[in-house]
Image (tube, rainbow, N blue to C red):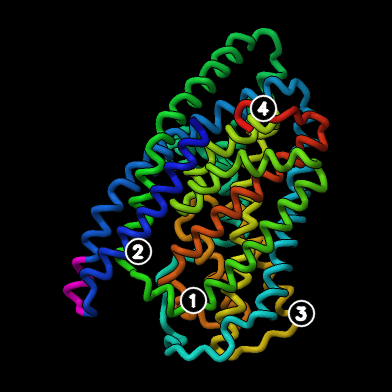
Amino acid sequence: MAKRLTMFIAIGLVLGLVVGWGINLAIDDGTAASAAQLKQIAGYFSILTTIFLRLIKMIIAPLVFSTLVAGIAHMGDGKALGRIGARALAWFVCASLTSLTIGLILVHLLQPGTGLHLALPAATASVGLDESSFNLNNFFTHIVPASMVEAMATNEILQIVIFSVFVGVAITAVGEEAAPLVRAIDALVKVMLRITDYVMRLAPIAVFAAVASALAERGPGVIGNLAYFMGSVYVGLIVLWCVLIGAAFLFIGPSARALVRFIREPLLVGFSTASSEAAYPRTLEALEKFGVPNRIASFVLPLGYSFNLDGSMMYMTFASMFIAQAYGIHLSLGEQITMLLVLMITSKGIAGVPRASLVVIAASLSMFHIPEAGLLLILAVDHFLDMGRTATNVIGNAVAASVIAKWEGAIGEPDPVQA
């Protein structure tokens, strides 16, 4: 079933490209009327994508809660939880620094913004992004949920993780008396995974609609205008993919080939929908089939979606330096390194924030006297770049969970049937 679904998702992606591009070519004549008509047609397509993403949002909170609580309960040792958490955070920091460094090196080699002959927006122009939430006080207070019901209702993954850790640790401390609750949560995990399977069968339709909507409204022209910038970002992402997969082979061994096969489907879902949430359930299943214990995968994966956004790190480096190059603003090496550190720190916990990468960039540019209005240059192609960085985040988090399982000596053999 998994291989067939991957094939259908790929078919949906190709059909979406063909249909969306065809509609744009047939209708777009450069007038405001045709643009409005294309936007309306894209809206019809996006209904299917919206329904699918709402179904995904419907299952994310109970899936994260149940799998994480069950994993911690079966861990049976608070020290093991702390050790796994420390190893996960150490890996996340190293991966983020690696991503930022590769991005900085490549953006200097490729120079995507140098000599750009585009009409730059006025420095006083606004991009309409809310940057107020990105400050130290809000970051730390937002981690802790004021209400578990509110956290689940708004799909605040990090808050759900915090509450789930408390519940799991408390169940472990209570011991045998909590056994009925553990059995109930184990049953909930199985139910949520079955619901996930039902929802994911709609993925090919959602992928088709998402890609067709984007191409119909924007057309191939918007890609061509910033083709070199987009190509540079994707070169960086591909290099990062190679580094991440290479790290998997280094720490896990030859069985990393099976990991690459298992994550093809969630990677395609993440790329096509540009949604990490859409890829999460299948990534969790893929890791378990690879041999990563549920207690580790269910803890590291949701944590990774808040702290290990490797693709977003790469994109933010390219976008920030691209804007500086486009404006002809020179930054010293010290300023560039400082910018990367600021981006790394301010990006933590941004999962679930709409257009989070753009908001983080906008909040950081002003510190280095770069007009935030430069983001207007890349807004048109942000969706197509979001596809790549989301897929990269999927790979980064899958590798992180697998490596940590290896360090814990808990990784099993890949499922031979699924492999």
Disc assigned to residue 416: 4
Disc assigned to residue 334: 3
Residue 280 % position (x, y): 54, 40
Secondary structure state at the residue bearing disc 4: loop
256 or 167, nearer to the observer: 256
Alpha-carbon distance for marks 2 and 1? 15 Å
Disc assigned to residue 227: 1
Alpha-carbon distance for marks 2 and 3? 40 Å
In magenta segment, residue 110: no
Alpha-carbon distance for marks 4 and 2? 39 Å
Q: Badge 2: how crowded within 10 Å, few (<14), some, or many (20+)?
A: many
Q: Earlier in the sequence, mark 4 or mark 3?
A: 3
Amino acid of disc 4: Pro
Q: Residue at x 68, y 21 (%)?
A: 73
Instruction: Locate residue 368: give its quadrant.
Output: bottom right
For the residues bearing labels 2 and 3, Cβ distance under 8 angstroms = no
Amino acid of disc 1: Ala
Mark whose residue sits in front, 2 or 3: 2
On the picture, is 133 further left or further right than 14?
A: right
Q: Earlier in the sequence, mark 1 or mark 3?
A: 1
Mark whose residue sits in front, 4 or 3: 4
Residue 362 % position (x, y): 52, 71
Secondary structure state at the residue bearing disc 3: helix
Q: Which residue is mark 2?
A: 215
Secondary structure state at the residue bearing disc 1: helix
Q: Which residues are magenta?
A: 31-37
Q: Badge 4: how crowded within 10 Å, few (<14), some, or many (20+)?
A: few
Residue 86 seen by the camera = no
